[in-house]
Image (tube, helix red, strand yellow):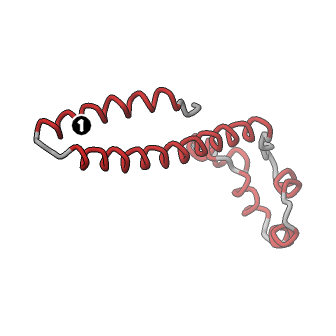
Amino acid sequence: MAYNHGREDRKWRIWKEAEEKILRECGVDEAVIEQIRTDDRADFNSNRRFYRWASDFGEYLEGMVDREKQAEIKSVAGLLDEIESETLYLALITVDRRTLQIACLTPCRLCGGVWGNRL
């Protein structure tokens, strides 16, 4: 969900007006209230910059997931075909076949108790 500056600004203003009302009722000096308001606004602006960036980054990641679908590995050959690192590939081809078959099991197969079907 995108960051909505207008909505967040309205929420901040309502909160700030309620806080200032309480401070005035307690007899706090106007100069102190103004300084608190300035400091709180600086915090709000800092948070706004962060959340706007975080929101954009989250949307970017969601888009990347849609574009880059992971291949479902169904066999040892499929596992070895998907390896991009030469070092990892060389290490895996020296491992026994049973270990590679275990590595091919997906989490849903592990939860479903289908250990014996592929081995």
Quickly name the residue at label 1: 19
Of residues 82 and 20, the one nearer the viewer is: 20
Give the quadrant of the N terminus.
top right
Q: Residue at x 78, y 39 (%)?
A: 69
Q: Is residue 2 above or below residue 116?
A: above
Q: What residue type is labelled 1?
A: Glu
Q: Residue at x 16, y 37 (%)?
A: 24
Figure label count: 1
Q: Residue 60: image x %, image y %? A: 70, 41
Q: Residue at x 41, y 44 (%)?
A: 41
Q: Residue 84: image x %, image y %? A: 86, 60
Q: Residue 29: image x %, image y %? A: 18, 46
- The quarter of the picture where residue 44 lies is top left
Q: Residue 102: image x %, image y %? A: 69, 57
Along the horizontal axis of the image, is 99 left or right of 23? right
SS for dot 1: helix
